Image: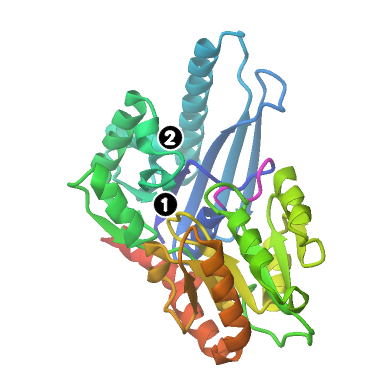
Amino acid sequence: MKNILWLVSWYPNRRDMFDGDFIQRHARAVSLFCNVHVIYVKKDDQLAAGRVLTETIQSGNLSEHIIFYNPVQTGIKFIDRILSHRKYINLYKKAILENIALNGKPDNVHVHVAMKAGMLALWIKRKWNIPFVVSEHWTGYLSNADSRIADYPFIFQKKLKKILTEATQITVVSHHLGKAIQKYFPALQYEVIPNVVDTDIFYPVQKQVSGKIRFIHISNMNYQKNTEAILDALHLLKEKDSFEMFLYGSSNPALMQMIDRLGLENNVFVMGEVQQPELAKAIQQSDALVLYSRYETFGCVLIEANACGVPVIVSDIEVFHELIEAGKQGIFAETENPAALAGKLKQFILQRNNFDGKWIAQTTAARYNFSVVGQMFSGLYNR
């Protein structure tokens, strides 16, 4: 069984259990076929200055080595950034050397999100001539993202280009993301390996009888997710007594005030952040998931809802057409148009029985389950 070393720029941790959780699900899928050793280094301001804390978790063929650090502060921002970066690199190198001492040299190195863990893959390649793969998830390549590559310093862009061009293979979760990367780096070729859905958690069940249509929205409710437009659309629905909307994820005071201002306090319920098993139960009892993003590289919550047999109502952006077929797994609504979204919500209320939940669940599970996606990565390593 191959030994694969994963160097990750994002990963769930005790400070943020949802940071790159889709990367962790990829790791679990790949660990069905390979030994996967994950290393993640994260700055943690809550630690005492100069302290380092390490957590190691072993589960089957997957080991997760998470290192928290808080560098000594000088009070001079420029110098503190340099010291933090140096500490990050040194801790990563130390962890890599310890992993090699324990498990031997890896057959392949796999970087998730090129910057900044990819810098360590370059070091490994120079030192031991071990090839590396990059899986990219970052929205910064997208032209309409609120934070793009062009907003970053030249040195960042130069290092990013070097990581991507020296990788043996680039994988992306969608053609939409791959084409966006090629606009910056035209010579790069990519392979699509999608996100996964845990079908042991997300599967269809018999819904409890309810007198109202139940919608669900899951996100961090930032600019990208455009949750405010969803609230505007709900406000435009005349049949306010006929539906409920449950919001799962991190909220903010402005959103709460908007719910009150639009008179939606009896229709919209903010549930906060929950773990996936609880989230799955909420989806299973919903009639449709609503995701009205301005931009995405994929959209994990869509395949999670579909795996439960629940159709989705989504913004009409390019990437969602890679996941959803109109009228089968969901409905598309014109972007940046709350009135259009309200119309599609109304359409769903009238036509919800037209969707075949059993077919939706079976099709989604067959395409995105752990075994299928894990084999894609395993095949890539073998090549």
As helix, strand or loop, the secondary structure at mark 1 comes to strand
Mark 2 highlights which residue?
A: 116
Q: Residue at x 29, y 29 (%)?
A: 158
Q: Could you tell me how far apart the alpha carbons at marks 1 and 2 are, in whole angstroms?
A: 19 Å
In-image side of 321 versus 355 (left or right)? left
Residue toward you, 383 or 265:
265
In-image side of 198 versus 319 (left or right)? right
Residue 68 falls in which quadrant of the image?
top right
**What secondary structure characterizes most of the magenta part?**
loop
Tell me which amino acid carries mark 1.
Ile
Mark 1 highlights which residue?
A: 4
| Residue 202 on the magenta span | no
Which quarter of the rendering shows the C terminus? bottom left
Task: Count neighbours of disc 1 (C-alpha within 10 A) and say few if under 14, some if 14 to 19, many if 20 or more.
Answer: many
Residue toward you, 246 or 107:
246
**Residue most toward the left?**
187
Q: Residue at x 31, y 51 (%)?
A: 180
Residue stretch rendered in magenta on the structure: 15-20
Tell me which amino acid carries mark 2.
Lys
